[in-house]
Image: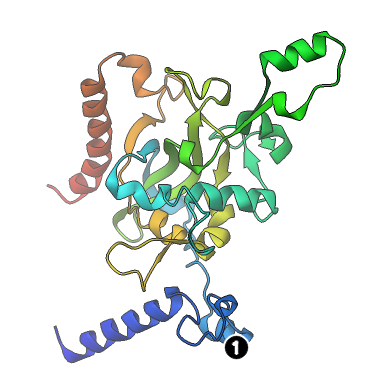
Amino acid sequence: MNLKNVIVIVLCAFVSTGAFAQANILNAKTPEDIGVKTDAQKLLDNDKPLDYGYVDDRDILYSRMTWEKVVLDERVNFPMYYPIDTNNIGKNRRSLFDVLMSNVKNGKIANIYDDSYFTTKRTLKDIQAALTLVDTTELGIEQLNAGEALSAEYINRRDITAADIVEYHIKGLWYFDKRHGELKYRMLGIAPVAPDVNFIDSDEVDLVPLFWVFFPDAREVLHEAKAFNNKNSAVPLTFDHLLNARRFNGYTFREENVQGDRTITEYISDNALMQLLESNRVKEKIRDFEQDMWSY
């Protein structure tokens, strides 16, 4: 490696550190100053998501749409799950679900959808039934039957929180760019998945996607939010970088197909091993296309 390449790498490292490190932590005079950038700092940083390059349809030689499960029990996926308790941690640390929900509530993520095809838009009010369970206890029912006003103490409210998120579903497109001669991936959508709130505390529950977010629409807010970096806490990763760089482990559970994009579990049932092998087969089939392009 020559001297020029070494200098470029070092400069990139310093720029990255300046862009992602917790702002103003060493210059703060009060705790409130930590994480607050001045207008001059913001102008100097010019910190925004890296724009996607334009891809003409004629440049796509091959493509395949896939859906993946990102299971949060796996250690590599922990940055998307934690922290689940925000009472004793700084406001700059939030889980991916909290980031999505807070920005849906404040309107920065304006559009959410009911499925991965982004056909029907939903509002926060529309999905509230999937996020919250309000139930009346037996004593409350007796109170209502007696013609009395229902007391607040007899109302149980159960909200879906970051701790309840089991996995994420991710939709993306693998495509071969013939202009650059390589296989690429573009994430299109993401959905938090949790147990059905109506049966959340029972032994057996079905997992349901709460809502779908069109990923390019959420890149700005995901870039502002930081995920924990186990290797260097001075250089946290943005959620936009983490997802675009595929710094997670996912299992393909569906690919577009002639049978109405059926899932793997629809044609391989009650056999987790064979489902995993089929998921790997789908991945390898896509990867092999690029390898076959250069094999004679």
Task: Tell me what residue is drawn at x 56 percent, y 62 percent.
Answer: 220
Up-down relation of residue 7 to residue 132 (above or below)? below
Q: Nearer the viewer, residue 50 or 249?
A: 249
As drawn, is 288 to the left or to the right of 117?
A: left
Residue 176 visible in this rendered orientation of the protein: no
Residue 267 visible in this rendered orientation of the protein: yes
Amino acid at circle 1: Ala
Quadrant of res 212: top right
Up-down relation of residue 165 to residue 24 (above or below)? above
Q: Nearer the viewer, residue 23 or 6?
A: 23
Q: Looking at the image, how many numbered discs can be counted on the residues? A: 1
Q: Nearer the viewer, residue 76 or 289?
A: 76
Residue 25: where, in percent of width, then height? Answer: 47, 80
Q: Nearer the viewer, residue 146 or 135?
A: 146
Quadrant of res 10: bottom left
Colouring convention used in this rendered image of the protein: rainbow
Task: Tell me what residue is drawn at x 43 percent, y 73 percent.
Answer: 20
Up-down relation of residue 2 to residue 145 (above or below)? below
Residue at the extreme top of the image, as rendered: 145
Task: Tell me what residue is drawn at x 50 percent, y 39 percent.
Answer: 192
Quadrant of res 257: top left
As drawn, is 11 to the left or to the right of 101?
A: left
Task: Tell me what residue is drawn at x 49 percent, y 78 percent.
Answer: 23
Residue denoted by label 1: 40
Residue 231: where, in percent of width, then height? Answer: 27, 65
* Quadrant that contains the N terminus: bottom left
Element at label 1: helix
Up-down relation of residue 135 to residue 251 (above or below)? above
Residue 268: where, in percent of width, then height? Answer: 30, 16
**Circle 1 residues within 10 Å: few <14, some 14–19, many ≥20:** few
